[in-house]
Structure formats: C-alpha cells, structure tokens
C-alpha cells in the first residue's frame, strides 16, 4: 500500500486505537448482561473484488471430479489490519446538533468527500463563511448549513470524523497455493452503527504484542499490541464471517497444513484452539464445543468453553485479539473463535470453517503456481 495512504489512515485511527483494538474480538451478552458493543453486523463485501466461487468449489469439490480432501495452513498468529473506508463517518457531533455519531458525510459545499482530510480542507477553504454539508442521517440524505468557528488559528465545525480503522486479530487459515487467508471469523464493524465497515482498501501488517489484559466477569480482556510498518499482504473483503485477502509474506505460507471439516463433521465435545499470547509463540489450548447450530451461516455457529487451566491463568479465558483463533477437532480444522461472553470470559462462540470459506469464495484469486 502507498505510504501516503498509511500516514493518512494512521493519523485518523491512532487517537482511538484502544477502542478499535476490539476489532480482535467482539463481545456478546448472556440474557440480563450488558454488551459493550453491537455484534449483530450485516455482511458487506468490498466492491473492489470480482465475484468468484472458484476457491469454495476447489475446497469442497463442488463442480470438481477430484475427491481428494483439501488442506490449509493453520493460523494462530496475530496480525494487524489497517483499512480505509469508502466514506467519512461522524464519531462525535457536538458542534453540529443536526448530525449524530454514525452519520456519513457525502459532500461539503457540493464537493464530494472521501477522507477526513477532504472535509478539513473544504472547511478551511470557507474562510469562516457558512458551509452546506450533505450527509446520510438515519438512512436519509439531509442538508445541513453550519458556520465554522475559528479555533487555534483553524476553522472548525466541532465534528470528530473517521475514514479508517485499525486493530489486531488472529489468522485462521492460509491457502498455500494462492496465498488467500482468512481471519477474525467476524467483520470489522462501525463502533457507532454496528454495521460492517465498507472498505475502500486495506492491508495486513505485523504486530508486536506487549501483554494481556486479563478478562474478568463483566469485563472482557484483550491482547495489547503495536501495529508495525511491515507489509504482509492485502485485505480485500470485510464480511460478517471474517476478513479475507492475499498474503504475500513467504514466511507465513510455510506453516503446517490440516484437512478442513464440513459442518456435519463438527461434534460436541473436546477440541483445541491455536492462539498467540506471547510474541512469536503459538500454542494449543483445550476447549469444549457445545450447542451446535448446523443451520448457521453466520459467525455464531456453536458455543465454546475454555477448559485449559493454563490459558485461563494467563488470559482469564477468551480475550479480544484471539478472534480468528483456529479450532481443531479430530485432527481437522473445523472453525474459529469469534465472540466472548461478557458475563463469563471462559465462554464464547465459534464459526464453522465452511462459513468462512463461503465468504472467502467472493475473492478473485491469483492463479496457483
């Protein structure tokens, strides 16, 4: 990705990084427990990719004469994501009461805007004269006239805006032949509206872990880390069932492979997850799968319970950042961790690997070597 894009995106997101770190794993609430964010996100795919079901057909043999089982490189490593949105979102609107958090800025004085910098430039250009803002407000397009005020030598509206997001999560799988990868097992959502963010572009980068905030009942924990400048690949899809793209870093393509499992093969009982809690050290931890919904096409396909005492001692159970951790059962890759319960961090949800691969099938793949 271009350095110009990185600098612009980082300038926008670093001030709210602690919030966006929850990209790693959303939280879910038991009945009667409060949830800190909306996890019911509708699937929105990037319009920058061509629709192709080739990967999904290859993986499950649909439309293919080959019955050879497909294997994928199993993830477990943490990774960073930096995405640029297709639009500019309002995060705070103290200076413009007619707007609210979650609204989308379309234009200023008739000129379309696609970045927060565009809005700032046009407000500055006004010289303090009233400007007309067109925005999507509550699903309808509205026009708002407002006069900027001079603050510290700059004309401002009293709006806080966002045009990008960043966070960390866990890689679920990589296809060694094409470089396609999947992670998170859920979408990166707008913190105000709860909708899956519509991407303009995105990239995958490295992460330096700095520690763990241990989860407690009523207070989900999280992995703490710093996103690096290393370019590991491109992010192409942000959907309800995960994020997907193409890995270009050769080192990430060299991991061990496992055969994938279909929904019908996932059973209640013992399983393991693979996660990275310390830098460069993936480890396998015991869990239990239960309450399986074979009809699930979303990110909450079955319940999971952490039974590994070593993991509970370090993290308290499932924490933000572990989202995407591969789930292994009977020697096969069956899915990924997606959610943690607010009331009990040892409880959460997982997604079928089949659901992730179905979403990944929307991406245009390079030709296999």
Image (tube, grey):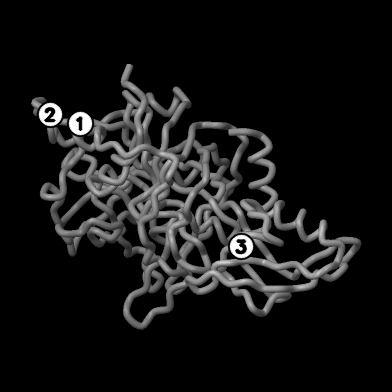
Q: Residues within 10 Å of mark 3 (few under 14, many from 20)?
A: many
Which element carries disc 1, helix, strand or loop?
helix
Which element carries disc 3, helix, strand or loop?
strand
Q: Which residue is mark 1?
A: 58
Q: Which residue is mark 3?
A: 105
- Residue 64 shows which numbered tag? 2
Circles 2 and 1: CB atoms closer than 8 Å: yes
Determine the residue located farthest toward the front in the rendered image.
Answer: 110
Q: At 56% from the left edge and 68% from the top edge, which residue is drawn?
A: 103
Position of 52 relative to 129 (above/below): above
Which element carries disc 2, helix, strand or loop?
loop
Circles 3 and 2: CB atoms closer than 8 Å: no
Query: Picture quarter containing residue 293?
Result: bottom left
Foreground tag (3 vs 1)? 3
- Residue 31 percent coordinates (x, y): 32, 80
Position of 66 relative to 270 (above/below): above
Q: Earlier in the sequence, mark 3 or mark 2?
A: 2
- Residue 319 percent coordinates (x, y): 44, 58
Q: At 38% from the left edge and 63% from the top edge, which residue is drawn?
A: 41
Query: Picture quarter containing residue 92?
Result: bottom right
Q: At 8% from the left edge and 26% from the top edge, which residue is drawn?
A: 65
As measured in the structure, the alpha-carbon distance from the residue carrying label 3 to the one carrying label 2 is 47 Å
Determine the residue located farthest toward the top in the rendered image.
Answer: 369
Using residue 2 as the reference point, say whether residue 263 is left or right of it: left
- Residue 289 percent coordinates (x, y): 21, 57
Using residue 348 as the reference point, say whether residue 141 is left or right of it: right
Query: Picture quarter containing residue 50?
Result: top left
As measured in the structure, the alpha-carbon distance from the residue carrying label 3 to the one carrying label 1 is 41 Å
Foreground tag (3 vs 2)? 3
- Residue 207 percent coordinates (x, y): 55, 41
Quarter placement of the C terminus: top left
Q: Earlier in the sequence, mark 2 or mark 1?
A: 1
């Amino acid at each position: 990705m271009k350095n110009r894009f990185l600098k612009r995106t980082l300038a926008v997101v670093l001030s709210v990084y602690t919030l966006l770190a929850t990209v790693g794993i959303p939280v879910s609430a038991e009945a009667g427990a409060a949830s800190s964010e909306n996890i019911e996100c509708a699937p929105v795919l990037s319009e920058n990719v061509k629709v192709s079901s080739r990967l999904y057909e290859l993986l499950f043999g649909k439309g293919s004469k080959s019955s050879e089982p497909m294997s994928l490189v199993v993830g477990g490593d943490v990774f960073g994501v930096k995405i640029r949105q297709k639009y500019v979102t309002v995060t705070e609107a103290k200076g413009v009461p007619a707007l609210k958090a979650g609204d989308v800025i379309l234009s200023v004085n008739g000129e379309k805007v696609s970045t927060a910098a565009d809005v700032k430039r046009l407000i500055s250009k006004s010289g303090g004269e009233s400007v007309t803002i067109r925005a999507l407000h509550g699903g309808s397009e509205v026009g708002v006239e407002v006069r900027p005020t001079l603050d510290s030598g700059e004309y401002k509206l009293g709006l806080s805006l966002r045009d990008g997001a960043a966070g960390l999560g866990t890689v679920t799988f990589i296809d060694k032949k094409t470089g396609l990868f999947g992670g998170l097992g859920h979408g990166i959502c707008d913190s105000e509206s709860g909708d899956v963010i519509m991407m303009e572009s995105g990239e995958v980068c490295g992460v330096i872990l700095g520690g763990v905030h241990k989860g407690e009942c009523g207070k989900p924990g999280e992995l703490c880390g710093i996103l690096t400048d290393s370019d590991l690949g491109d992010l192409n899809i942000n959907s309800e069932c995960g994020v997907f793209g193409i890995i270009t870093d050769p080192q990430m393509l060299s991991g061990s492979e496992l055969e994938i499992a279909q929904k019908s093969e996932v059973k209640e009982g013992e399983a393991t997850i693979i996660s990275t809690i310390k830098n460069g050290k993936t480890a396998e931890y015991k869990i239990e799968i239960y309450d399986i919904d074979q009809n699930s096409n979303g990110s909450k396909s079955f319940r999971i319970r952490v039974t590994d005492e070593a993991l509970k001692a370090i993290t308290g159970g499932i924490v933000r950042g572990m989202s995407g951790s591969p789930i292994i059962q009977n020697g096969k890759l069956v899915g990924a961790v997606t959610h943690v319960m607010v009331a009990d961090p040892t409880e959460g949800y997982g997604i079928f690997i089949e659901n992730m691969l179905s979403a990944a099938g929307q991406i245009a793949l390079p030709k296999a070597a």
